[in-house]
Image (cartoon, rainbow, N blue to C red):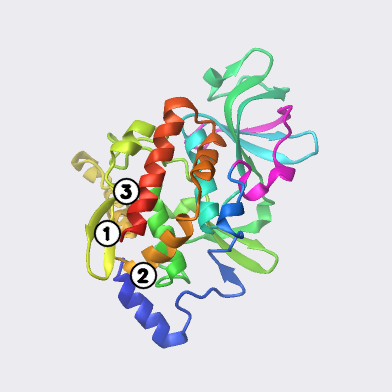
Amino acid sequence: MASAGAAADQRGAADGRVGLLSPTETIWLDPGPVASLDLIHGVGRKASTPGSAGRFTFAGEDDSATSPKFDVTDETGVVWKVKLGDEAKAETAATRFLWAAGYLVDEVHYLETITVTDLPELKRGREFVVPGGIVQGARLERRRPTDTRVGEWDWFDNPFVGTKELNGLRVMMSLLNSWDLKQDNNAIYAIGGQRQYVVSDLGGTFGRTGDALTRTKGAPKDYDESKFIAKIMPDAIDFVLHSRPHFLGVVDVANYRERTKMEQITRDIPRADVRWLARRLSKLTSAQIRDGFRAAGFSGADLETLSRVMRRRIAELGAL
């Protein structure tokens, strides 16, 4: 990525939009006073959370995704996309902290068990199902109307390059140890005459960044042991993101180039924009941070580890 500071200067000279968002395009919306945010329910608020009974009807399997996925309909007719496996908890927690920071996210919830009527034998994820249609460890994402997704966006070429909002999002990716920053994981949604830019897949978080042999997700110990800040410069900060493939992966040239370029996303971030984000995150209470992870099904030692590391990393940002 080109120097973020230089990009900001160029955009400022051209149109004065640095740090500002277009009324028709946005990547950041203030959800309200940080200390009052409910990280248990997140962007969906309590009213739209899937019913406590956890009863759903099967609506179709998605056998093309990386993780096991299928659709269900709840008792009110809302369609939810269920994801199973080691991304379920991590993704739910990631949406809570991105939302608290002001970023647009999909509505996601985690339920330890759900009961699914008419559930067939799944092609993938059968290990998470027990007799009676009971599914364990389910992340539920509210399905948006299919016509609202109008495209994808590129970290290096989008309307927000050089703004504090995009730079803050770049910091958030390192804060969460998000390593799967491919373009097809970034969605543009058309909602109410506005184009909303969203990181739409956050399953590769809260573990260790790295190549295909070393990276993890939803692994609190790995998250704890990971380095966060790579380099402190007078006017900019480099944050850690390892995504370059193992040298044997060079045979897939396109993937090697994409993953190597990805490491630039969290580098050369203006110090002023880091401080802007840090001021917001520093208002999160210890109870809210714990709630963000509890909402994702983490408990016991894992909950304590993740909460401690998140508090530590926010403090590191505040000290820059």
Report the amino acid beneath label 2. Ala
Mark 1 vs mark 3, CA separation in Å: 23 Å
Q: Is residue 273 left or right of residue 229?
A: right
> What percent of the width, then of the height, locates residue 11?
41, 81
State which tag comes first along the sequence, 1 or 3. Answer: 1
Q: Position of residue 132 (x, y in %)?
A: 69, 14
Where 286 falls versus 282 (above or below)? above
Question: Is residue 200 shown left or right of residue 305?
Answer: right
* Residue at the (58%, 63%) spot, across then down: 30
Dot 1 alpha-carbon crowd within 10 angstroms: few under 14, some 14 to 19, many 20 or more: many
Location of the N terminus (image quadrant): bottom left
Q: Is residue 238 left or right of residue 126?
A: left
Range covered by the magenta-colored residues = 40-67
141 to 158, vertically: above or below: above
User: Residue 234, position in %: x, y?
Assistant: 23, 69
| Up-down relation of residue 191 to residue 285 (above or below) | below
Q: Is residue 25 left or right of residue 254?
A: right
Q: Is residue 71 visible?
A: yes
Nearest-to-viewer mark from 1 and 3: 1
For image coordinates 45% across by 77% down, the residue present is 18
Label 1, on which residue? Answer: 238
- Mark 3 or mark 2, whichever is nearer to me: 2
Residue under numbered circle 2: 272
What residue would you read off at disc 3? 255
Which is nearer the N-term, disc 3 or disc 2? 3
Whether tag 3 and tag 2 are in contact, CB under 8 A, the answer is no
Q: Give the label, 2 or 1, closer to the camera.
A: 2
User: Dot 3, crowdedness within 10 Å: few (<14), some or many (≥20)?
Assistant: some
Front position in the image: 192 or 294: 294
Q: Amino acid at mark 1?
A: Asp
